Image (spheres, rainbow, N blue to C red):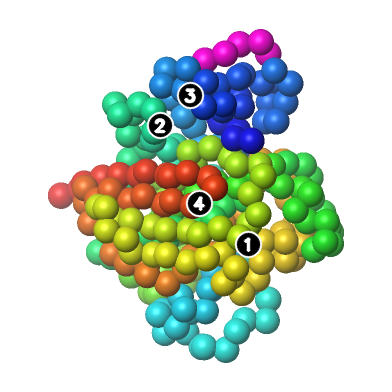
Amino acid sequence: MKLVRFGAGQWGILEGEMIRETDGPAGNPTGHHLDLGGVTLLAPATPTKIVCVGRNYLDHIREMGHDPDLPKEPGLFLKGLNTLAHPANPARPDQSGDVVPYPSFTELLHFEGELAVVIERRMQKVSEEEALDYVLGYTCALDVTARDKQKTDLQWVRAKSADKFCPLGPWLMTSLEPQNTTLRTYVNGELRQEAHTSLMIFPVARILSYISEFMTLEAGDVVLTGTPEGVGELRPGDHVEVAIEGIGDLHTRIGHKPA
């Protein structure tokens, strides 16, 4: 089942090109039906926090020049709520979604395509065996990173949490097997990243259980599960597509850098 968030914050179930409106995420039908092409899509989550996993694919660890030994536990960081950016609507060529600003403070903006998880209900100290029962759905994410500031700043706030640095969408898929799909990232139509999610060092269930041991995950929270190898530079005007089999495609434009 595909869940969409649209308009002024309504939710619905996407069936073909028609949205059956509900009274909340995975809620009850309201009786209203809308055409997908007639709405503006929103990021399919209303988080209190965005938790991200770094170094969750071995080849990405190697390409970044880090210790090739496998990490013993997930390495986490946060992105601010200001980073959430809305997706383009595949049924509306006139709607490009949010444009990610190219900040004046960086000279090296990078893309990182990722599988994202949206939480359905409060999750606290949940076992790995039960963790996926707390998932509302899965979607595509673009973790935009100011790579030069990630290397020089004491913390990753500027590098990871500038405005619109987390495009999300276009919708949630509720029935995905998170360790059995393929993620691809394209920049201006050129394939730059491709990896099967079975290659994650820490599977999604382990990540969620680990986080819930010390941080309560609330309904609507977002967890980004790491990026594979192939990350690279973005330039003003670039078009980025994160495509995950079984979900769909997230399209994002990069804005022009201030003079």
Q: Which residues are magenta?
A: 30-34
Taking the image as shown, residue 207 lies to the left or right of residue 33, namely: right
Taken as a whole, is the magenta stretch helix, strand or loop?
Answer: strand
Which residue is situated farthest in the left direction here? Answer: 259
The local secondary structure at tag 4 comes to loop
Of tags 2 and 1, which is closer to the observer? Answer: 1
Q: Amino acid at mark 3?
A: Glu
The local secondary structure at tag 2 comes to loop
The first of marks 1 and 4 along the sequence is 1
Q: Could you tell me if the residues under marks 4 and 2 are in contact, i.e. CB atoms within 8 Å? A: no
The first of marks 4 and 3 along the sequence is 3
The first of marks 2 and 3 along the sequence is 3
Distance from Cα at disc 4 to Cα at disc 2: 18 Å
State whether residue 159 is above or below residue 32. below
Residue found 43% across the figure and 25% down from its top: 40
Dot 2: within a 10 Å radius of its alpha carbon, few (fewer than 14), some, or many (20 or more) residues?
many
Residue 147, percent from left and from top:
36, 68
Q: Residue tagged by mark 3?
A: 17
Q: Residue tagged by mark 2?
A: 89
Q: Amino acid at mark 2?
A: Asn
Nearer the observer, 224 or 76: 224
Residue found 67% across the figure and 30% down from its top: 25
